[in-house]
Each structure stands twice: as structure tokens, then as C-alpha cells.
Amino acid sequence: MAKTLTRQQHLDLYYYMRLNRAVEDTMVKLFRQNKIVGGLYSSLGQEAVSVGTAFALEKKDWLAPMIRNIGALLVKGVRPRDVFMQHMAKYDSPTKGKDGTSHFGDLDNLHIVSPISMLGDLIPVMTGVAMAGRYLGQRIVAMTWIGDGGSSTGVFHEGLNFAAVQKAPFVLILENNLWAYSTPVRKQVPLENLADRAKAYGIESYIVDGNNVLAMYSTAKEAVEQARAGEGPILIEAKTFRRMGHAQHDPAEYVPKEMRAYWEARDPIALYEKFLTGENLLDAKGRKEIEEKINTLLAKERDFAENSPLPPPEFAETGVYCTGDDCHKIRAKWERPIAEVTPPRSSVEAVWTVPGFGSGKGSGGAHAPIHFGDTQPAETKPAEAGKSAVQAPAKAAAKKTVKAVPASASRKARR
């Protein structure tokens, strides 16, 4: 699949990865100058995941990033200035200074759903987006991302099961960072491959080198085409490593130095640059041109963001409270009067008490439906009074042993 890319597409992948890193480097400088409001979250070392997967989508497709998927936003068409202003709480930012980080979307033009901090919640949301597109005959695909830690949340499993039952045109990218904040994966999940979780729901999954942008792109492209053809949902596990801590305040000293050194040597941008030069797709002149293009762009975008005004205090409550006129423009449309679809009240009087329930203690258990605490069961015969109310079985049931299923030689887990 990757071999079908044109030279320009190869260079576009390289450009977006470089832009992704440069945008984050710029924000680190702004953060250290106290110009960023709130936290700052880095995706250093994971640029190939965001860029490679988003690059596989068509313009009409929808995505919902996590706070670290800035590369996906850039591929979709979000301007660096919007990312800067959003983090700086400027009035010209997408949320008019009401929220920091990447909590913004663009439903009208770019088809971006805002990140949700409750990790995993985007899975059922994007399943709904995918199903809506199907009902409207749009043949769209919805995509979102989740981390290794987030894949242990209840809504991850509920949402994935929902998507599987509905055969939604949905692609889930599972970034296996090896660490969920400060907890290693081996202490989270008794699995070598998180992609195996897809088997429980009867859907296909892929395991990919998350630091190889071509592998990420080609796998995501195949998954998107499958989902669009009605074979979704698809889960892709990207094996990668986040080389920064949870946020700027976290030095990630819990990560072994040897592990960090290993992944630094497998930098996704450096690996792709080596490939491009080896295939004569990029030379020193081309690299310099891309660097100058990014530097010029970001200087202009940063200048715009820094000179953007802060929100006027008079507008502090604007867009915060829903008054009826300024709510979300997508509203429910009732085809029938509400009274017709409201269930009638029951004609049976509700009974909320059980005779004698709770009166066991202090009454000798005469009316107690169950044995409460130290009250002797009412039905116990005198000869059995000294015996325990529950007899243990003579022999404990033997523990069942489930043999581990060996990992398939294929990197693709099928139904």
C-alpha cells in the first residue's frame, strides 16, 4: 500500500511529522515563558501514529483526537495558530479562551469532534457518528484514538462491543505507550498484545510498529477501506513509546533509562528521513526547504497567537450556560407530540415495603426474611442451633487451568 504513494505524498507525511514536532517544541517554549494556561501534553516520539493514521482518511471522514494527537489535527487542516491560541486561552481561539489544550472541534468544515477527557468515551461517540453517516448514505469512516491505560476503562469495552454489534464503519487506534502515566502495561493487562482484546468482540485487529509512519499509514488505509466497505469496526494497536512524561510537570523518572534510550534510537522522524534519502525521495536541499517552510509558518502563526487579545471579561459567561437560544445547534426534532410518546402512568399502586423486613434484630428473627447479623434464623431447629447457617462443601472445587493460546505468527488477528 505504501508503495502506491506519490513522491509528494511521501514528502507530505514527512512534512506533517516535522510540523507536529515543531508545533509542540514551540509550545514548550511558550509554556516555559508562562504564556500557556494550564497543562501541556507532549506526543514526542509518537508523531508517526497521529500523522500516519489521519493521512489515511478522506476529507469527508470524521476523527476525534485525544489531547496528544496534534499531528492528526494538522493533517485534517487545523492551523498551528489555533493550537497555540487554544493553549494560551486567547479570544481568537476555537473556544474563545474558554478551554485550554486541544479541547475543540470543527463539526461544520473539518469534521473534527472535540477530545473528551474521560478516556474511552469517544469510542461510543464516534461509533454514533459512523452510524449516522451510514444512515445518511455518506459512506464515511469515523476514527479515534485511545491509550493503553484507557483501554482498561469500562466504556472502552462497552463502546467497542456496541461498534462491533452495529458493524459500524469505525477505526480505533490503540496507542500502546508501554506506560499509562506511571504504570507499565505489564502491570495493567495480562496480555502481550492489546490488539487481542478485539477478539472478544469478533472484530479484526492489526499490530503495527508505531514508529514506522509507512506501516501506520498503509495499515490504517486498509482498515479505513475495510470499514467503508462494511467490514468494520477495526482496531489497530500501535506499539510505540511516549518519550515525555504525562505532562510538562512529569519528568517520567519512573521509566528505565535503557528503555528510553532504545526508543530514542528509533525516533520515527529519523527513521522516515533515512528511508526517504535511501529511496532518493529527499535530499539535503529538500530537507532544508521543508525546515524553512515550517520555521516561516510557525514564526507567523506564533506571532499571530501572541498578539491575539485575551477574552473580554464581559464575555466570561457567554457560551457557558445554555439559555435555549445559544445551545448547540443540533436539536432533537419531535415528529409527534411529546404527550403521545410519553408512557402512561401505572394504574397499580406502588408497594415499597415488605412486611417484617428489617425487624429481624430484636424480634428473635420471627419475621426476618434473611439472617441478620447475630440473630439466629427463625427456622433453625434446636438440634441444629450450634451449626453454622451455611455449611462449607466437603472439598473445595478444583481450580480450572486455562492454557495460554500461543500468539499467531501473523501480525493480523482475524475473527
Image: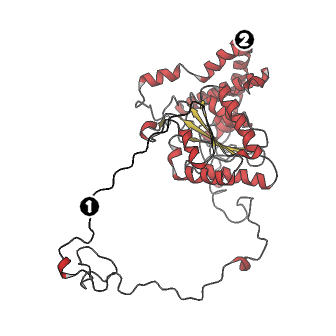
Colour basis:
secondary structure
Image quarter of the C terminus: top right
| Residue 116 visible in image | no
Q: Nearer the viewer, residue 296 or 90?
A: 296
Q: Quadrant of residue 280?
A: top right
Q: Residues within 10 Å of mark 1 (few under 14, many from 20)?
A: few
Q: Residue at x 73, y 41 (%)?
A: 226
Q: What residue type is labelled 1?
A: Ala
Q: Which of 352 and 318 is in front in this view?
A: 352
- Mark seen at residue 394: 1
Q: Which residue is drawn at 76% across and 77% down?
A: 337
Drawn side of residue 335 relative to residue 103, left or right: right
Residues under labels 1 and 2: Cα distance? 78 Å
| Disc with the residue nearer the chain's start (1 vs 2) | 2
Circle 2 sits in a helix, a strand or a loop, which is it? Answer: loop
Q: Which amino acid does label 2 sit on?
A: Asp
Against 25, is 223 above or below?
below
- Mark seen at residue 35: none
Q: In which quarter of the image is residue 58?
A: top right
Q: Which of 226 and 310 is in front in this view?
A: 226
* Tags 1 and 2 touching, CB below 8 Å: no
